[in-house]
Amino acid sequence: MKFRKQDLEDSLQAHQYYADANEAESWMKEKEPIVSNTDYGKDEDSSEALLKKHEALMSDLTAFGNTIEALKEQARNCRVSEISFCNAVFLSFLSMN
């Protein structure tokens, strides 16, 4: 009975990690067009608007760092006895960086 409970807890941990990782990856893909934009503006007003977007993005990225740290912690906390789970979580995390 203890083993089943532990297996279920491990499974819950894995599913939670993958849900959180998918959400983080979606967030990053959403921000990709902003990061890859090469427009510098045509005049002072448009350049100022782009600068404000850039500043907002930098603020979002700083806040998003907490999400990435939480994902790292989830990956570290996987049980050592669950080697395949740990490898899958670790590889998933590396693919996000």
Image (cartoon, grey):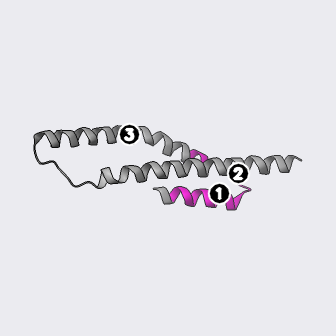
For this view, does 29 lie left or right of residue 43?
A: right
Report x, y in % for residue 46.
16, 42
Does the magenta run of residues contain 40?
Answer: no
Comes first in the chain, label 2 or label 1: 2
Q: Are marks 2 and 1 in contact (CB under 8 Å)?
A: yes
Gap in angstroms between the C-alphas marked 3 and 1: 29 Å
The crowding category of the residue bearing disc 3, from other C-alpha atoms within 10 Å (few below 14, some 14 to 19, many at least 20), is few
Nearest the eye: 82 or 25? 25
The crowding category of the residue bearing disc 2, from other C-alpha atoms within 10 Å (few below 14, some 14 to 19, many at least 20), is few
Say what amino acid the circle numbered 1 marks.
Cys
Comes first in the chain, label 3 or label 1: 3
Comes first in the chain, label 2 or label 3: 3
Report x, y in % for residue 13.
68, 47
Query: What segment carries the magenta color?
Result: 72-94
Identity of the residue furthest to the right in this view: 1
Residue on which the image places disc 3: 60
Residue on which the image places disc 1: 86
Say what amino acid the circle numbered 2 marks.
Arg
Does the magenta run of residues contain 74?
Answer: yes
Name the residue rendered at 36%, 53% in the picture. Answer: 32
